[in-house]
Amino acid sequence: MARSESVYVCQSCGDVHAKWAGRCDSCGSWNTLQEEASSEAPLSSQAGVRKRTTRRSRLELVDLGSATEDPARLQTGIAEFDRVVGGGLVPGSAILVGGDPGIGKSTLLLQAVARLAYAGAKAVYVSGEEAADQVRRRARRLGLSDAAVALAAETSLETVLDGLKAEQPDIVIIDSIQTLWSDQLAAAPGTVAQVRACSQELVRFAKKRNTAVILVGHVTKEGQIAGPRVVEHMVDTVLYFEGERAHQFRILRAVKNRFGPTDEIGVFEMADIGLREVANPSALFLDGRGEAASGAAVFAGMEGTRPVLTEIQALVAPAAFGTPRRAVVGWDNGRLAMVLAVLEARCGLGFGGRDVYLNVAGGLKISEPAADLAVAAALVSSHFDTPLPADGVVFGEIALSGDVRPVGRADARLKEAAKLGFKSALTPAGAEDSALRVTGFSTVQALVRHLD
Ligand code: TYD
Ligand code: MG
């Protein structure tokens, strides 16, 4: 029955193709098809999985209205972590934590699981990347040696599952999913077939045994979890742990969560004794701000439920030669093009022969449209070479017409600014605050006149 032909499996979406192609028809990614012997292909692996579960049983029907109490969440006591997962880990849920190698995933999860163990949860940490001794040494350095975490250095899925069934833990960390392999498949560890099959079994284990399972996944250069995107679809929660290696701080971000909001972030600082929570990220992001320089604007943003202030820096400079450069770090390229176009078309500012650089200080990535006005203010300030008031914040959305639109949570943004000692704000018309001098704008033209 075994065929020896090859199939080509997309390493991004996991789709199986009979022929090699430069581009995957299913997900559109380039250069992701990899040859695998068809006996190792996911299709046959699924057949293998199915074989074990074809024992027919009666479909069990329950009433929709007979829900039991929500289970108590497992809280680590690390507030930045618990908030991002929606108020603690839900028993029986599967969580994927992705991030660049070396960003601090193992450190964060070891700290989290140790805190759960201190609180009485039964915890298992399976390391496929490091030897048990290495993990133990790290635990000692973090001052967590006395935590009752059962540790295993193992890469065989079957061995891990057998052990977990015997142990019946409340929480399991699998570090990392790419090192795990199942002997049901001939494919190498880390391939799409293995990652998918192992994740599937572990997610099934989580649901069946009511254990919270955290899978650690490495991220490729393109910023995707190596192996199949399908793992993201299998789990309940996907968290990304990100940050610049050069900076001390790290951000834990929920990108999918069946049990909580997806716009929350948790901010940590990498210290020599592990990750420290940063309860007041604005202070961190604004740390080291010097004298008011032209091109810098403080954006009063929201990250989930929490206001976060960051500095947006713009530099408008004569283009050296040829096509002027547009370089953006921490914001959307297309959005910058739009703000520039509005400033050109509605306010007559010329950026044609000039390079434009935009940087969100500290390495935070901003996705809110509310940053438009702060970006515009930074660009205009650099263009005229006049600094914005050092004690002011900016926020507001800009429409293509040049209108400045109100944004959500203006009150929370202004309160945070006042708390951090700011004295004034440039906002959409209609915002008010008792502690700040608020100047409202209904058009971007009015902002340019104000700054000129
Ligand atoms: P690690 O958790 O191993 O990253 P990942 O699991 O995402 O690959 O963290 C690795 C980096 O963190 C490493 O470069 C050293 C640094 N680090 C500290 O700065 N302080 C610490 O207390 C620890 C444990 C690690
Ligand atoms: Mg690691």
Image: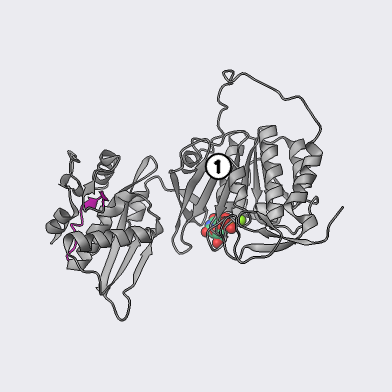
Q: Quadrant of residue 179?
A: bottom right
Residue at the bottom extreme, as displayed: 321
Looking at the image, which is closer to me, 213 or 51?
A: 51
State left or right for residue 354 relative to residue 73.
Answer: left
Q: Quadrant of residue 320?
A: bottom left
Looking at the image, which is closer to me, 151 or 47?
A: 47
Q: Is residue 395 magenta?
A: yes
Looking at the image, which is closer to me, 29 or 194?
A: 29
**Quadrant containing ligand 1:** bottom right
Residue drawn at x 57%, y 55% is 27
**Residue 245 locus on image (x, y percent):** 48, 62
Per the rendered image, the range of residues in magenta is 386-399
Dominant SS type (magenta): loop
Q: Is residue 316 above or below residue 339?
A: below
**Residue 417 locus on image (x, y percent):** 26, 46
Residue drawn at x 49%, y 55% is 242
Camera sees residue 293: no
Residue marked by disc 1: 237
**Residue 394 locus on image (x, y percent):** 24, 51
State left or right for residue 37 relative to residue 311.
Answer: right
Q: Residues within 10 Å of mark 1 (few under 14, many from 20)?
A: many
The three-letter amino acid code for the residue at tag 1 is: Thr
Camera sees residue 111: yes
Secondary-structure class at tag 1: strand
